[in-house]
């Protein structure tokens, strides 16, 4: 990583949050329902506090859009450069104890994620990437491995999608895209599997928010892929954008492509 890279403090924040998540995961905890019906736990809240403190220390002038803060109505003036944080993406996987939950931290500049970190605490698997720096993976605290999307296979695409949130009609849409194999996965690890060349495409036809996708989009872009918004008819309309003026931060449907 370049000396001016934002990634090292982002990685440190993700690892620290992940350590706290794993501590609570081992002990067990109860879930509460948020206003939208989605679950939240003390692991979400503790991890977010750790990330906010770490980012404020390293980047005191850059505002942070964080999921639990936003859900509580505490949203700073974001401007054109801000961090986008989901402290525990895949809370359902956390509660189901399937290991498929992550810490997501992204830096957004002029509406597009420019750097991202995704850390899966249970598997000790970290992905990161930044514009101009490429993307990499670290397993279990070991050496950094460069990752990249793979060329389109001639025999058909491997698609990846949500284990818990598959929308009606997903199978038909996947077939129309040329997907012949399908891998279910939870949380933002779906972006990472496309970024490392395990899968080719991740179509998403259900609801997501900016903190669900920003880190994955940054990593996938750094690995040679792209994330495109879809209109109501399923047509690609350009890169998925961030910092929406309505301050609800809901994404349209999108498709994440490898090379």
Image: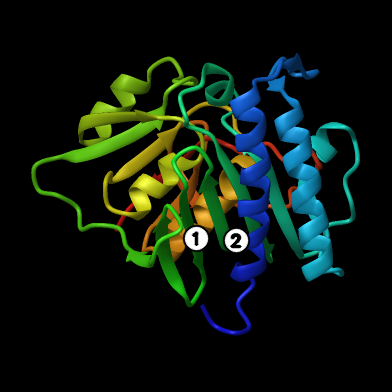
Disc nearest the viewer among 1 and 2? 2
On screen, residue 142 above or below 229: below
> What residue sits 77% from the left and 61% below the top?
55
Q: Give residue 246's position: percent from left, percent from top.
A: 81, 41
Residue linked to disc 2 = 11
Residue 28 seen in the figure = yes
- Asked whether disc 1 touches disc 2, contact meaning CB atoms under 8 Å apart, the reply is yes
Give me the residue at 88% from left, 45% from top. Answer: 75
Determine the residue located farthest toward the left in the rendered image. 155
Q: CA distance from mark 1 to mark 2?
A: 8 Å
Residue 61 image offset from top left, x and y in percent: 86, 69
Left of 14 or right of it: where is 80? right
Q: Position of residue 90 (x, y in %)?
A: 56, 30
Front residue of this view, candidates 257 and 50: 50
Residue that appears at 44% across and 20% down: 166
- Quadrant (top left, top right, bottom left, bottom right) of the C terminus: bottom left
Toward the bottom, the furthest residue is: 3
Q: Which residue is mark 1?
A: 128
């Amino acid at each position: 990583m370049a000396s001016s890279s934002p990634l090292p403090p982002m990685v440190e924040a993700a690892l620290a949050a992940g350590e706290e998540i794993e501590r609570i995961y081992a002990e067990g905890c109860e879930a509460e329902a948020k206003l939208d019906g989605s679950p939240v736990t003390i692991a979400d809240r503790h991890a977010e506090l750790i990330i906010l403190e770490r980012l404020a220390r390293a980047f005191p002038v850059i505002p942070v859009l964080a999921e639990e803060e936003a859900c509580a109505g505490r949203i700073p003036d974001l401007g054109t450069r801000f961090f986008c944080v989901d402290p525990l993406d895949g809370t359902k996987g956390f509660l189901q104890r399937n290991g498929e939950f992550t810490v997501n931290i992204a830096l957004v500049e002029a509406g597009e994620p420019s750097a991202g970190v995704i850390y899966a605490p249970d598997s000790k698997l970290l992905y990161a990437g930044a514009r101009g720096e490429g993307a990499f993976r670290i397993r279990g605290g070991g050496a950094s491995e460069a990752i990249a999307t793979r060329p389109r296979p001639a025999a058909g695409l491997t698609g990846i999608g949500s284990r818990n949130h598959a929308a009606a009609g997903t199978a038909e849409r996947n077939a129309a895209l040329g997907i012949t194999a399908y891998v279910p996965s939870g949380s933002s690890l779906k972006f990472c599997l496309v970024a490392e060349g395990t899968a080719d495409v991740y179509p998403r036809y259900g609801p997501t928010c900016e903190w669900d996708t920003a880190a994955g989009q940054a990593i996938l872009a750094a690995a040679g892929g792209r994330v495109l918004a879809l209109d109501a008819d399923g047509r690609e309309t350009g890169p998925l954008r961030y910092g929406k003026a309505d301050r609800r931060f809901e994404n349209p449907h999108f498709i994440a492509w490898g090379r």
